[in-house]
Amino acid sequence: MAIDRDDRVDTLAKMTAAVHQHGGKIFLQLAHAGIFAEVEHSRQRPVSVSEQASESDVLTLAAIEQLVTDFTQAAQRAQRAGFDGVELHSGHGYLLSQFLSPAFNQRCDDYGGCITNRARIHLEIIRSIRNMVGEGFPLMIKMNCDDFIDNGLTTDDALSAAKLFAEAGIDAIEISGGIIRTGKLSPSRPGISRAEKEAYFAAQARRFKQVLDIPIILVGGMRSVEVAESIVRTETADYISMSRPLICEPDLIRRWQQGDQRKARCLSDNLCFAPGFAGQGVHCMTRNFNKLAW
């Protein structure tokens, strides 16, 4: 799925129309993988913020300017396709996240160094999109609260960047963390088997909530109604977000609403990633087993 060309709009409009027909809302997440791009699928060389690997091309100033244009045009297409808003993906080590992280960003120009410089491309994208889509079109950002790697983005710097994003026109921030392929502190942690392992970015989200006036959304290991309700009740975050549980069980929220409040069936085994990387579409590999177990 992509929104890099105008001829994608009509097909995506069919999807948004179907969602709206059933009373739902749908945002489009705008992401660029940077050095983590799956080149077998993109058939293009990956790009990097600064020198990371011989297989990637370091972004020039002209390329950064083009990226701002590309993100802006993608947001405009999303609006035309009927999406209810867009979310910029600046987490998990993808390209925008790489700009924020000292572990990836060793630039010596206006896009490197202090956190204000490392957040510069985000601010340019946010302001450009806002100028094109208007004030009434929601614009969110998903960002790391911490990279949890050596020399990575810290929570203090993430908070500083978040304040800049809010001032530039971001309507809500989704809090995540970690870098893909980095082990136990990765964004999608395995083995979420009890409540104590859920909501693993809650402490950081609480700090964001304390200093920002825009809604905070928390993702990361949510599996039970009790934990989700606690997050909102204690004002750790305004909303909760889930991914893997809804891949396994798309009607999870309806089940909870109807009174069956057993925790999500998701085993947190991350097997759902494999078909996605194979180009077969993300789907749960153990769902049938789960139904039998229940």
Image: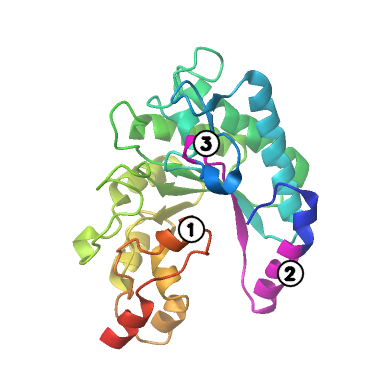
Q: Which residue is mark 1?
A: 278
Q: Residue at x 30, y 75 (%)?
A: 263
Identify residue type, mark 3: Gly
Instruction: Find numbered disc 2 in the image and state the secondary structure of the residue it sits on.
Output: helix
Mark 2 burial class by Cα count in 10 Å: few <14, some 14-19, many 20+: few
Looking at the image, is mark 1 or mark 3 earlier in the sequence? Answer: 3
Looking at the image, is mark 1 or mark 2 earlier in the sequence? Answer: 2
Instruction: Find numbered disc 1 in the image and state the secondary structure of the residue it sits on.
Output: loop
Q: Residue at x 71, y 54 (%)?
A: 78
- Quadrant in which the C terminus appears: bottom left
Nearer the observer, 239 or 179: 179
- Quadrant in which the N terminus appears: bottom right
Q: Which residue is mark 2?
A: 14
Where residue 228 sits, quadrant-wise, is bottom left
Q: Is residue 27 magenta?
A: yes
Nearer the observer, 232 or 94: 94
For the residues carrying marks 1 and 2, which lies nearer the camera in this image?
1
Identify residue type, mark 1: Ala
